[in-house]
Image (tube, rainbow, N blue to C red):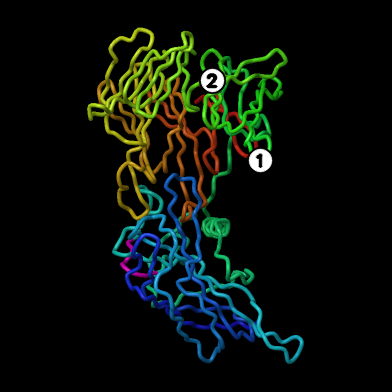
Amino acid sequence: MVRKAIIILVVIQGACSSGPTQIGDYGPAAVVLNARFDDIPSRIVASTVVVDSVGHCAPDGSAKPEVKEVELERRDVFPFAAEHPQFEILSSRGTYPFDLPCGVGDVRFFRTRAYLQQEQGIPPNTTGWSSVGAWAPIGYDLVYAPSDAIFAPFGPGGPTLGLPKGYAWLHRTCGASPGSITMSIVETNEIVEFQNTLQPFDSGRPPDYPAIEESERELVESCGAIVPAQDLGLRLSFDRAQAMVWAPDGTSLYYLATVDSQDPSHSVGLRRLRLADLAASELATVPFANNLQIDGTGQLYVGNKNNLLQVSAATDGKATLVTLPFPADAVPSPDGHWLAYADQRVQVHGWDLQSGSDRITVTGMFLSWSPDSNLAYSDWSTGAFTIDVLSPATLAAPIIYDFGDYSLNSSVIWDVDGPLQVQVPLDWSDIGRPGYGTSCQACFGLSVVNLADGTRRQILDASAGRITIVPAPSRGGLTLVWARTCLGLYDTVCTESLLRIGLAEGTAQTVAVAPQIYPLAVSPDNQRVAIAAPSGIYVKSLAQ
């Protein structure tokens, strides 16, 4: 291979010069890119330059970054002459329709790549050309900002960078200390080196998520950063469970496992795993099952597409399913006496399973059952946000607590002294400004509010990562949260840490480490947690 360096001037010019214009459209502003291609083979006769848009927003923290070939410019250039290293590419389009996952006016990110075509010389006297690979600026992402902005991709506890209005290169390099990565802005009039990535020519397909994840991981690891390894504890089964509950005596796990991924009825198997000998047995097959619950008496409930199903044991070890006239998300009380469900009129019902009648009908939103089977709901009918705790057994006047700071990203849990509100207070977008409303696209930190006296205590600050509260009953003064930290851009090279939060002492302890959030269940004695990963069912100790 002949080693050469060729400087190429790339001009991307659109009919609109202001960037994003309206939902679904992007009119590229004019920009000039200066590229230097190293390790150029001989007999290069043409080039194709492609710019791809990276949809980097993942509001719920689970979606992968979506890459779409927006074609700000893609043009075959012929001839490619080393003696004339500069050439222009002009866009002939006005707008480029594609989704704007971050909303109108947000910062846009792009990845640039170029393919070089080589003249075919075998057999002699033939014409035509073939691709010799792809070149890309390693560590450089093209960024467009409609106005000056602060870029904070890792939350309020991470590094920030000022983005100028218009186009610029976002450049990342290894920092002075091992594992650190620095971000800087490089103006587009500077020459950026494009390196051979040894990828085949595929101009019709943009780089997908695995390619971005791989490139980000390579950059992170090249800088000495160590990605935490998965740590889920002891594997008990190779089954892949989508929901789990513990038996009240802690000797077994019940779970829902996929039977056949091609089954049009989406049936799952209800199985029991006996912990003493790890023997698994199939109890029933449930079409369209979507949740699994158990009360303190050991009564199982499964939700399907429309209804809640009661699981009844049979003499042959199998189980029968009884359809109940309640929605699939109805919740049994710990004592097994009641079912809470909501109707379409924003009313909460407390159904007496023994008498077969509604015992309670109140206006509001169901929150949870207390450990002693009192109904907790939020009454918004007066315009004030309160938590009302009502005994379905006595029907005495409810105990009313102020809701504290209203947030959709909060959870009501129970301590020995009464209800607490766990909040994730810091709503943050990667452009470094607070999020809008209560959507909590990227929430950081953790606070606990004692609803009895209104006192607040911060347990986690923003450095802990993006927090997701585990929707599981809190027992014994502890609750669980997932804390997400990322080392690469676009939610890549990420780790989810399962944290045990001690409410009384205000402590946080790492229990498990995973690449993403997995379903879990806490044992009745608060000593163990079962985790359902794609590779099987695991159990870890919660003891400090």
Sequence-first tag of 1 and 2: 1
Eye-nearest disc, 1 or 2: 1
Residue 42 at x, y = what percent?
Answer: 64, 85
The residue depicted at 73 percent of the width and 92 percent of the height is 125
Q: Which residues are magenta?
A: 162-168
* Side of 429 where 268 appears, left or right: right
The residue nearer to you, when weighing 539 against 324, is 324
Q: Which mark is residue 417?
A: none
Q: Position of residue 347 (x, y in %)?
A: 35, 24
Q: Which residue is disc 2 drawn over?
A: 294
Q: Quadrant of the N terminus?
A: bottom right
> What residue is pinned by disc 1?
261
Q: CA distance from mark 1 to mark 2?
A: 26 Å
Across and down, in percent, residue 6 comes to: 53, 83
Q: Secondary structure at mark 1?
A: loop
Answer with the quarter of the image where residue 15 lies. bottom left
Residue drawn 71% across the image and 21% down it: 277
Q: How many marks?
A: 2
